[in-house]
Image (spheres, helix red, strand yellow):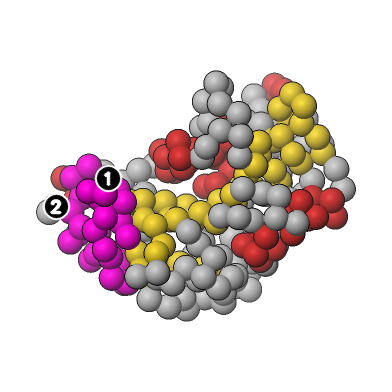
Amino acid sequence: MTEKDWQPLSRGQMAARVARDIPEGWYVNLGIGIPTLIADQVSGDREVIFQSENGILGMGRAPNPQHVDPWLINAGKQHVTLQPGGAYFHHADSFAIIRGGHLDLCVLGAFEVAENGDIANWATSEADSAPAVGGAMDLAAGVRRLWVVMEHVTKEGKPRLVKRCSYPLTALKAVHRIYTNLAVIDVAVEGFRVKETVPGLSLESLQNMTEATLIDDRAN
């Protein structure tokens, strides 16, 4: 299969694909990077309550440039809006929500995810966009479900879905589902189960871009 036979999803399309799977009424934390785009992709007729660990509950879409509130930002220091009924509060109260198990879902970006669900999404190098742990360890341990959204391979073409993470770990066996620009993959006891691929992409081609073994579960 040649590259022209299939088209990877854009960052916005990846966010929209994740948004489609979030049930109405869930309380959801969004990590920095692609996950922050998800709030913009939830349709107006559905209610999903987004939380930001810097102290927001009921976070809305990104604001129009002419309506920016300079004091209202998410954990990634991006300007956001507040939904009707939303609130902002102390950082410690926000982490009490996270550590208390009150969030249905967290969606994080990652450098790597291992076939057993280990996640690595932080680094110590100043060259990396996420140079510190932040709230990711608390989120991975405290939320009911953890999904990851990321590019399937690095800019150099190296797999991000691996047998064992080479980056420092954020959490052990924490990831339930992975959304990439090529596929939707569940993390099961037996390994990576492919639920969906972009049109035209074969499992063989996806496997060639994945270090860990993939299980075809697209018909189920």
Q: Nearer the viewer, mark 2 or mark 1?
A: 1
The image quarter in which residue 177 lies: bottom left
In the image, residue 15 lies at what x, y percent?
47, 41
Q: Is residue 176 left or right of residue 207?
A: right
Q: Secondary structure at mark 2?
A: loop
Residue labelled with disc 1:
198
Query: Could you tell me which residue is drawn at 45 percent across and 36 percent down?
Result: 20
What amino acid does circle 2 point to? Thr
Name the residue beneath numbered marker 2.
2
Whether pointer 2 and pointer 1 mark residues with C-beta atoms closer than 8 Å, the reply is no
The boundaries of the magenta stretch are 193-220
The kind of residue tagged 1 is Val
Magenta stretch contains residue 90: no
Q: Residues within 10 Å of mark 2 (few under 14, many from 20)?
A: few
Q: Is residue 45 visible?
A: yes
Residue 83 in picture, x, y percent from top left: 71, 27
x%, y% of residue 153?
36, 61
Residue 144 figure quarter: bottom right
Q: Position of residue 176 (x, y in %)?
A: 48, 59
Q: Residue at x 79, y 46 (%)?
A: 55
Find residue 189 and name its label.
none
Q: Residues within 10 Å of mark 1 (few under 14, many from 20)?
A: some
Element carrying mark 1 = loop
> Mark 2 or 1 closer to N-term?
2
